[in-house]
Image (cartoon, grey):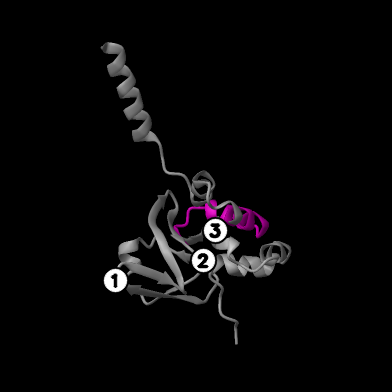
Amino acid sequence: MKRTLSLIALALSSTFFASAADIVDTAVAAGNFKTLVTAVKAAGLVDTLKSTGPFTVFAPTDEAFAKLPAGTIEALLKDTEKLKGILTYHVVAGKVMAADVVKLKTAKTVQGQSVKISVKGSTVKVDGATVVKTDIVCDNGVIHVIDAVILPPAKK
């Protein structure tokens, strides 16, 4: 009995003192953001997304990246400036939880342009991509999962 209580206490203390991972580590651990993580590395954004932040990331899954035309990902991995622009278009400065996102019509991205946000019933869209999971809290922000890669409008 005493050993069981000690094990329970140890488990509780480990859980209590464990801190959330940063955005990059959380994406890696999730397992369904392999393409996103590869792109973040190629664009040189790992240190940024591991920094203090806070950041809100609208994160496309591997399935979302797979919807892009054949060869798009490979081309972007070679054009790191364009890739960086696309990835930073998925990031908003600050920690914007789902309850706050639904109150917005737009959100300015780290890339400099704004994404459009629309809400119809329980469906939230960011530039046409549907938010499929919200409020994955990280120690330097939050991730909201989207079902498509969003592209910044061409600058005029």
Amino acid carrying mark 1 in the image? Gly
Whether residues under marks 1 and 3 lie with C-beta atoms below 8 angstroms apart, the answer is no
Amino acid carrying mark 3 in the image? Glu
**Location of residue 132 in the rendering, given as x and y in whole percent from the top left corner:** 41, 60
Labelled disc at residue 102:
none
Circle 1 residue = 121
Q: Is residue 41 left or right of residue 115?
A: right
Residue at image position (41%, 71%) is 125
Amino acid carrying mark 2 in the image? Ala
How many neighbours does mark 3 have within 10 angstroms: few (below 14), some (14-19), or many (20 or more)?
A: some
- Confirm whether the magenta stretch covers residue 46: yes
Circle 3 residue = 63
| Distance of label 1 from label 3 (alpha carbons) | 24 Å
Whether residues under marks 2 and 3 lie with C-beta atoms below 8 angstroms apart, the answer is no
| Distance of label 2 from label 1 (alpha carbons) | 20 Å
Circle 2 residue = 148
The first of marks 2 and 3 along the sequence is: 3
Residue at image position (52%, 77%) is 113
Residue at image position (34%, 62%) is 98
**SS class, disc 2:** loop
**Location of residue 44 in the rendering, given as x and y in whole percent from the top left corner:** 65, 57
**SS class, disc 3:** helix
Residue 100, image quadrant: bottom left
Q: Is residue 7 left or right of residue 47?
A: left
Q: Quadrant of the C terminus?
A: bottom right
Q: Which residues are magenta?
A: 36-57
- Determine whether 119 is above or below 135 in the image: below
How many neighbours does mark 1 have within 10 angstroms: few (below 14), some (14-19), or many (20 or more)?
A: few
